[in-house]
Image (cartoon, grey):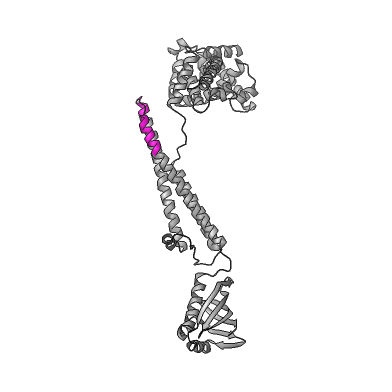
Amino acid sequence: MAEELTRSLTTLAERGVPRGAAAVLADAREDAIREPAPRWVQRPAWAAATAFVTTMAVLGGSLVFGLAMRRPGTDVGSSWFPEAIGDVASTATGWWLLALAIAAALAVVGALVVRNQQHRTSKERTMTTTIERPPAEQIKTTERNNRWLVIAVVVLALALLALGAWVIFDQASQPETAATTEVEALYDDYVAAWTDSDADAFTELGTENFVFTSFGVTFSQSEQAASVAMSGNPVFERVGDLVVMGDGPDYFVTAAERITLRGTEYFGVSAYRIVDTEDGLRIAEHHWVGNV
Amino acid sequence: MDQTDVSQLLEESQLFEQLYQPLRRFAAVVGPIESDPDDLLQEAIARVLRRHRLTDLDQPGAYLRRTIVNLAANQRRQLGRARRAFAQLAASGGSNSDVYPSDLGELLRLPPQERAVLYLSEIEGYRYREIGQMLNCTETAARKRALRARRRLQAAIVGEVADG
């Protein structure tokens, strides 16, 4: 059998009429020039969809991580952000909408790239079967259009990733003791009630068992409300940021304050215990230590 | 085209001149009977030239052999139906048997990879380790392919003898 096998292989190897090395190489070089290797591989639509979902998951994860580091309802914007976008992005919902818009644009452009490449491949295949080659100009135009679409995909993807990275950075740069918008709003309303000498508003912002202490003297809510009504419109100015401790339902807040009353300035520190009630945040205790 | 390009092309041509005969014979063995060996070799060279120069490859002969086997396997799949029809014609003693001896029919029924291993070991005298490196498989895989191919041919011969 070995002899027969050798004979068969030799016969097979010598079949046909050789064209010669030079002719074969010349034809191969011409083929190589006419059909250069593709510079990039066409990706199907499912790959674009996968990229979209992955990007959204990364961005969503970064937002969840950032929000988990802050209390609910945190402002996510920044003062240096363009005002128009900052207004939209002033809440977590705004950021999501912005991210969705970029991701949607990314998906559309990506789909156009895929469609463009499929169209080109189909065109070339059709023309090849009729023994014609697509005009070089047509291929160049398609390649030029594709190039811009690819650039758009890259830019949008980078914008989306930059958005997510910025959110993480913004959240990470906030101190843990920074106040939430609700606490800030409550403090501002409380101070406004003092300034306006508005006893009703003052009462509404405190709990039923609200107490105010100053220099060791304790006042109930009704007593202090009466005092507020006759306070003579003091002007409260907070020095620095509110410092918040606690994760709820009780929050301990301190504020350095400058109070101007009838032309005289007083300095002190207020300590508040804020509780989360069914009606929202309310002040349960206010302790003042200062020079008034 | 500058002088460097011209000298590179000349060097490439000289290299291919040395490789042409053994590669053509190899392509004739592994390629489908319907395709011309020079066409198969030309397509393999074109594929390589799209990305590299022949002179840039460490082992151009081995690289081209691997490309030829892959192309032959692709063509064999595409010509599957035609191949089955040809096999029936060869078995019934059709006109093609006037050109090629009928014992070639069994050899042509083998997949290109097995034919490649048989040719490289029986005719060109390569060891299975070298064949494995050429065809991008292990030495064991190359041996198994050769063994499988010989068994098939043996079974076919025994079958022919039994049919008488």
Q: Nearer the viewer, residue A92 or A121?
A: A92
Q: Is residue B94 above or below residue A39?
A: above
Instruction: Tell me what residue is drawn at x 47 percent, y 62 percent.
Output: A92
Is residue A131 found inside the magenta-colored segment of the image? yes
Q: Nearer the viewer, residue A16 or A273?
A: A273
User: At which x and y percent is residue A281?
Assistant: 51, 76
Q: Is residue B74 above or below residue A245?
A: above
Q: Quick check: can you spot residue A127?
A: yes
Q: Is residue A97 above or below residue A212?
A: above
Q: Quick check: can you spot residue B80?
A: no
Q: Nearer the viewer, residue A8 or A287?
A: A287
Instruction: Tell me what residue is drawn at x 40 percent, y 47 percent.
Output: A108
Q: Residue furthest front?
A: A263
User: At which x and y percent is residue A268?
Assistant: 59, 80
User: At which x and y percent is residue A244?
Assistant: 57, 72
Is residue A12 found inside the magenta-colored segment of the image? no
| In the displayed structure image, the side of residue B53 where residue B95 appears, left or right | left
Q: How many marks?
A: 0
Magenta segment, which residues?
Answer: A126-144
Q: Nearer the viewer, residue B134 or B113?
A: B134
Determine the main secondary structure of the stretch shown in magenta: helix
Q: Is residue A208 above or below residue A163?
A: below
Instruction: Tell me what residue is drawn at x 49 percent, y 51 percent.
Output: A55
Residue A209, quarter of the rendered image? bottom right
Q: Residue furthest top?
A: B98
User: At which x and y percent is residue A196?
Assistant: 45, 83
